[in-house]
Amino acid sequence: MNALTTYEHLLESVPKEVREPGELVRQLKEAEATKEKLHQAWDEAQKNLNQARETIAKASTHEQNATYYLEESQTKLKNAEQTFNQALEQSGFTNETDYRNAKRTEEERKAMKDRIESFKQQQATVQSRISELRDWLSEKERVDIEGFENKVNEAQKVMN
């Protein structure tokens, strides 16, 4: 083997990126770009983690407050029920229904039932009329009020 062949043979055993500086520079830039992308992704992940931690902390605080107010409300409700039941017993009523019925006369109860039925009928009539008016309006063409007002204003200017 001559020296040139030996040299070429040795040169081929050296990796391409080491033999060609341009290839080494390209791979280095590629590695730096990848490193930068990974760094940005890491920063974004850290930011998201911190936001998640804040959200969890807020949710935990809200849950604690809600639990506290729920327990407090349940205690107040229980106390109010006990007070009401004691007042019922002291007044001679056997249950809440008897108490409520005793508060109204038969005429008042009948009048209330009639008013409720009348209200329901009026509500149904109004809802039906609203539906009819919506259907009627859906067939109508919308008028451009602003355009109309502009034309009126222009006409007034011309007349003045």
Image (spheres, helix red, strand yellow):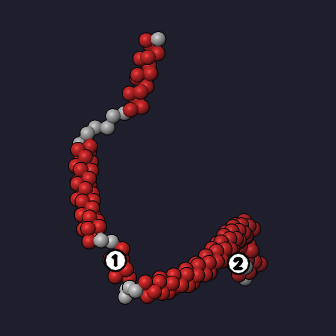
Left or right of 97, for residue 45 = right
Q: Which mark is residue 64?
A: none
Residue 80 lies, with reference to residue 156, above or below; the image says below
Is residue 104 or residue 37 the one in the foreground? 104
Residue count near mark 2 (Cα–Cα under 10 Å), binned few <14, some 14–19, many ≥20: few
Q: What residue lies at 48% left-to-right and 87% top-to-bottom?
A: 86
* Image mark for residue 102: 1
- Tell me the residue at 27%/61% (across/down): 115
Residue sitting at x 45%, y 86%: 90
| Residue 30 seen by the camera | no
**Residue 100 appears at what percent x and percent y?**
36, 77
- Of the numbered discs in the image, which one, if any, rests on residue 15? 2
Q: Nearer the viewer, residue 118 or 7?
A: 118
Q: Is residue 89 visible?
A: yes
Identify the amino acid type marked 2.
Answer: Pro
Identify the residue at the far top of this view.
160
Please determine whether, in this image, residue 93 is positioned above or below residue 123. Answer: below
Helix, strand or loop for disc 2: loop
Front residue (pair 138, 49): 138
Q: Is 111 drawn above or below residue 130 in the view shown?
A: below
User: x, y percentage for residue 11?
Assistant: 73, 77
Q: CA distance from mark 2 to mark 1?
A: 102 Å
In the rendered view, does 24 fall on the left or right side of 104? right
